[in-house]
Structure formats: C-alpha cells, structure tokens
Image (tube, helix red, strand yellow):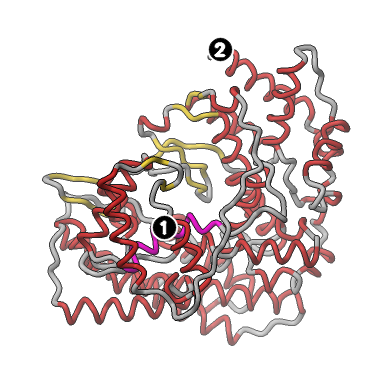
C-alpha cells in the first residue's frame, strides 16, 4: 500500500528512481538479481538455498518448514513483480524534457525489465528447489519439461543461447577438452580419462552442423609469478589492504566477514567468507581481486552513481565482468593481441548442456577432485544446476555471460581506443557512446575516479625492492613503466601521476605494510 501511494505521487523521473532505489534495488533483492546462489547443508544430506531463503527472506530452516519457505518466497516475489510492472508503466508515461533525462529514462526502464525477467525465472524454478533439498524429483515429467521450457525461453533472452547453439563456441570448447590428458593442467587418472573420453563422444552428438573450428588456447605471456606473489597473507591483513585501497579511492565500501562462499562485491561491503579456506590468500590472488572488485566494479559503481543515479546497474553483465576480467589479464601481461578466447571457462557448462544427471555428477566429481574446486562437491553441483531440475541436462547460463563477451571489449578498444569510457557507467556497450555527453556536460566530471593500476604499483614496488633494498618509489618512473607495459591502452586521461602524488603518503604506507607482512613469512 505504501509503495502504491508513493508511486501515485511520483510525478518525475528522479522521484521514480528514488522509489526504485528504496523498494526495488535494495540490497536483499540484489541477492536474487546476481543469481549466483549458494547452498548450505542443513541435516541428513538436505541442502537449503541460503541465498534466497535465508539472506533474502531472513528466515531459516527448521524454524520454518521447507514448504513454508517456498510459499513465502513465491508470495514475496510476486509482490515485487507487481511493483515492477506498475513502476515500468508509470515511467513509460512520465514526460522528460532533455536528452540527458531521456537517456536516463531509457536505461532505467531497461534495468526494471531485466530485473522483472530475473524474478519471473526465480518464481518458475522455485519448485525445483524442493528437489535440491531432498535430491529426489517430486514433479511429473510433463510439469518439469513445461517449467524448463519457460525458463529456457527467458534465460535465452537475458543470458543468450547455449554453447551447443554456437558453432564457434562449441568447437572451441570441444577441442579444448578433447585433450583428455589434462583439465586446467591437472593430471587425470586413467579411469577418469576414459570417462572424459566417453563423455566427449556423447557431447559430439550435439555438434552444430558445421566443420570444426580450431580455436587456439591462450598462450600465457605471464612470467611475473615470482616467489613473493605466492606468499600467503592473513585474512586480517588482506582485509586491511582492501579497506585502505577503498579509502585511498574515497570509495564507501569496506570489507565485512559474511557467510558468502567467495569474495563478493556487495553494494555496501566487500564480503569476505568466514570459512577456513579464506583464512589466508596468496598475494597474487589479492592483487587480482584488487583489479577485479575494487578497480573495476567499485569504481564503475561510484562513477555510475555520480553521473546517473544511485543504484547498482542491472543490464550490464557482459561489459562489467569483462572489464574486471580484462583488468586481471593485462596485469598478467596479456595485451589486445594475445587475449584470445577463454573457452576453457565454458567447458563445465557444455557438460551440463549435454549430459544426463548421473553422468553430470560423475563429471563434477572429477572436476572437484582433480581441479580442487573451492566449493564443496555437493554445492558445486547445485550451483551449476541453479534454476533447473536435477533430472535433465540443463544448467543456468549466467556464467556464459561472464565469459563470452570478451570480444566485445576487445573490439571496442581496438576500434575506439577510449579505454576511460569503460569505467564511467554500468551500462551496455551500445549505450556507452550515446551517453558520453552526460559526462561531457556534467558538473561532477572532476569527481570521477579512474584506476591507478594499484596491483601494478604493488608488484613494481616489490620487484624493485627485491633487486635493490634501498629503492625509493618514484611516481613518474612508475608511470613510464605503466605506459610501456600498457602501450596498447589510452591511459592519459586517468591523470595517474597527479592522483598518485596526491595520495602518495597513504600509498607508500600501504606498500610498506604489505612488504612487512611478506617479510614476516
């Protein structure tokens, strides 16, 4: 009732956006929008979807029965969908009087429609969650296939087609995994080799009707894996590193210990898992997390909020994740010419598209055992199968959206060379240049943040100290190093020298902190 009353009184775009920020884009709903659900064992081999039913509903099992959680979730999501529909209709009828406002309105409606699709999928598939609790199917075959058909239709709209629908992706993936001696460079046993070979023959039957395309695997240029990058840093210390870097950038986020299964870029907090496996992290991974979570996602969130509005953007997954992955890879000495297909990320999803339940869980056992996955075996299966029944060869395709748009990032950079634009908004590729005028006209242009390539600062400092213990960090010399390393990127607009010099005292203090922690090992 309160939402409907406020919607009735909202007569301009800004008030509608504020309303969405409070009632639609709140932190709890973000857990569903992200759709990378986590699962928790509760008792007697039962698993509960802790993301939806504990983090979203703030209810837990066994205080509420599984059936009660299921009913409460469906009811609450349908309320949210009705609110979205009302907000979309009202926004479409709202008049705007400038190009700036027209662009904001278009992007706002796209975000609302995207989230509505995500929520509708979650209502459709919530029946399948009962199966995941008990590992037993309770729906008829006809009902399951009907639900899967509806989910597939919606997933295709927001996450695009399957790998088996794309000849280049299929054959690149097939060729990668046809080298049965290794998966991700981990040696397989003879038994597992035979199983993988047999599964490949099964997958071959799904091949698109085109000749195989051989996609070369990445040829890593990274020779920077030095001893100090492999040294572990405690959770207390790496939290301080993350917090200090956010403070240096004037970003509002700080770290927080949560039940997350991995380090996660929450809206208010960089969530750090409390599990034992995150009690320490190697410096190399910490530096990649800095580039991925802070210098990509959080900087983009900050700039987006400064130039457009104050909620996390929804319909931007490929661009956002590939900026983050791109930043990781150039830190590893890749460049535009040798960042190729990352088809090895696709192959677990291809298995899930083609293999029946029994074969898929056997494959997941091999992957978990041989590749030492961070998640436990059961939750790895459930996460792959999120949104789908356990009985059928389908998996969710959001992970493909993380991966398959690398070419769009590379094409944009090669065509335009305007690297800085990719950090201004959390929007889709085709909107980047359309809304650049907002940046050009903005009075807050000087408030925009760009990356300092902080991981390179750390690596450069430690590498020089390794060679000369009396080394003193010089900002201008570091910038020349950066320009040489990233010769293929336009980083002139980032004003790196000026911004490092402004924060030099804090940066040097953090570098010495990291150095002391490594020396203590």
Image quadrant for the N terminus? bottom left
Q: Quadrant of residue 470?
A: top right
> Residue at left 44%, top 71%?
3
- Left/right placement of residue 251 relative to residue 488 reads left
The residue that mark 2 highlights is: 520
Q: Nearer the viewer, residue 65 or 368?
A: 368
Residue 506's image quarter?
top right
Could you tell me which residue is drawn at 53 percent across and 71 percent down? Answer: 168
> As rendered, which of 141 and 441 lies closer to the eye?
141
* Residue 254 rendering spot, x and y as whole percentages: 55, 38
Of all residues shown, which one is farthest toward the bottom? 93
* Label 2 crowd (10 A; few <14 / some 14-19 / many >=20): few
Towards the viewer: 395 or 355: 355
Q: Do the residues labelled 1 and 2 touch (CB within 8 Å)?
A: no
Where residue 62 appears, x then y in whole percent?
Answer: 15, 49
Q: Compared to 378, does 243 lie above or below?
A: above
- Which span is picked out in magenta? 342-354
Q: Earlier in the sequence, mark 1 or mark 2?
A: 1
Residue 4 visible, this orientation: no
Reply above or below: 19 against 335.
below
Compared across the picture, whether 430 is left or right of 63 comes to right
158 in the magenta segment: no
The crowding category of the residue bearing disc 1, from other C-alpha atoms within 10 Å (few below 14, some 14 to 19, many at least 20), is: some
Q: Which of marks 1 and 2 is in front?
A: 1
How far is mark 1 from mark 2, CA to CA?
A: 44 Å
- In front here: 4 or 25? 25
Helix, strand or loop at mark 2: loop
Splitting the image into 4 quarters, where does residue 2 fall?
Answer: bottom left
For image coordinates 47% across by 61% down, the residue present is 175
User: Which label was assigned to residue 178?
Assistant: 1
Residue at 65% from the left image edge and 35% from the top image edge: 223
């Amino acid at each position: 009732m309160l939402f409907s009353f406020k919607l009735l009184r909202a007569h301009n775009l800004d008030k509608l956006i504020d309303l969405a920020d409070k009632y639609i884009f709140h932190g709890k709903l973000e857990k569903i929008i992200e759709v990378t659900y986590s699962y928790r064992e509760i008792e007697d081999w039962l698993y509960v979807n802790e993301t939806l039913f504990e983090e979203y509903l703030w209810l837990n099992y066994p205080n509420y029965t599984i059936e009660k959680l299921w009913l409460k979730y469906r009811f609450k999501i349908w309320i949210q969908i009705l609110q979205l529909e009302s907000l979309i209709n009202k926004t479409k009828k709202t008049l705007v009087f400038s190009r700036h406002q027209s662009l904001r309105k278009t992007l706002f409606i796209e975000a609302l429609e995207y989230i509505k699709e995500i929520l509708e999928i979650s209502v459709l598939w919530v029946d399948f969650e009962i199966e995941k609790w008990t590992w037993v199917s309770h729906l008829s075959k006809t009902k399951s296939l009907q639900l899967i058909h509806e989910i597939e239709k919606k997933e295709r709209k927001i996450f695009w087609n399957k790998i088996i629908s794309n000849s280049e992706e299929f054959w690149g993936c097939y060729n990668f995994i046809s080298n049965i001696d290794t998966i991700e460079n981990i040696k397989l046993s003879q038994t597992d080799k035979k199983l993988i070979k047999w599964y490949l023959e099964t997958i071959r039957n799904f091949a698109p009707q085109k000749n195989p395309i051989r996609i070369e695997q990445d040829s890593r240029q990274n020779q920077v894996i030095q001893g100090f990058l492999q040294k572990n840093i405690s959770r207390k210390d790496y939290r301080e590193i993350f917090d200090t870097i956010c403070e240096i950038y004037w970003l509002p986020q700080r770290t927080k210990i949560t039940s997350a299964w991995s380090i996660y870029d929450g809206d208010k907090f960089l969530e750090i898992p409390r599990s034992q496996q995150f009690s320490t992290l190697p410096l190399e991974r910490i530096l990649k997390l800095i580039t991925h979570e802070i210098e990509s996602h959080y900087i983009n969130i900050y700039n987006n909020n400064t130039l457009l509005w104050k909620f996390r953007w929804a319909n931007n997954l490929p661009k956002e994740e590939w900026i983050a992955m791109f930043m990781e890879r150039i830190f590893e000495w890749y460049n535009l010419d040798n960042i190729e297909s990352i088809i090895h990320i696709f192959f677990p999803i291809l298995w899930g598209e083609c293999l029946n339940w029994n074969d898929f869980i056997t494959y997941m056992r091999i992957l978990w055992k041989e590749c030492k996955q961070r998640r436990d075996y059961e939750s790895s299966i459930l996460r792959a199968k999120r949104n789908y029944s356990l009985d059928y060869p389908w998996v969710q395709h959001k992970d493909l959206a993380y991966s398959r748009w690398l070419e769009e990032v590379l094409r944009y950079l090669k065509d335009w060379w305007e690297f800085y634009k990719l950090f201004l908004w959390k929007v889709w590729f085709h909107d980047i240049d359309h809304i650049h005028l907002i940046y050009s006209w903005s009075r807050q242009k000087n408030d925009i943040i760009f990356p300092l390539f902080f991981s390179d600062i750390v690596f450069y400092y430690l590498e020089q100290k390794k060679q000369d213990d009396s080394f003193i960090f010089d900002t201008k010399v570091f910038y020349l190093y950066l320009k040489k390393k990233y010769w293929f990127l336009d980083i002139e607009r980032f004003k790196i020298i000026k911004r490092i010099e402004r924060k030099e005292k804090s940066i040097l203090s953090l570098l010495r902190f990291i150095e002391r922690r490594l020396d203590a090992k």
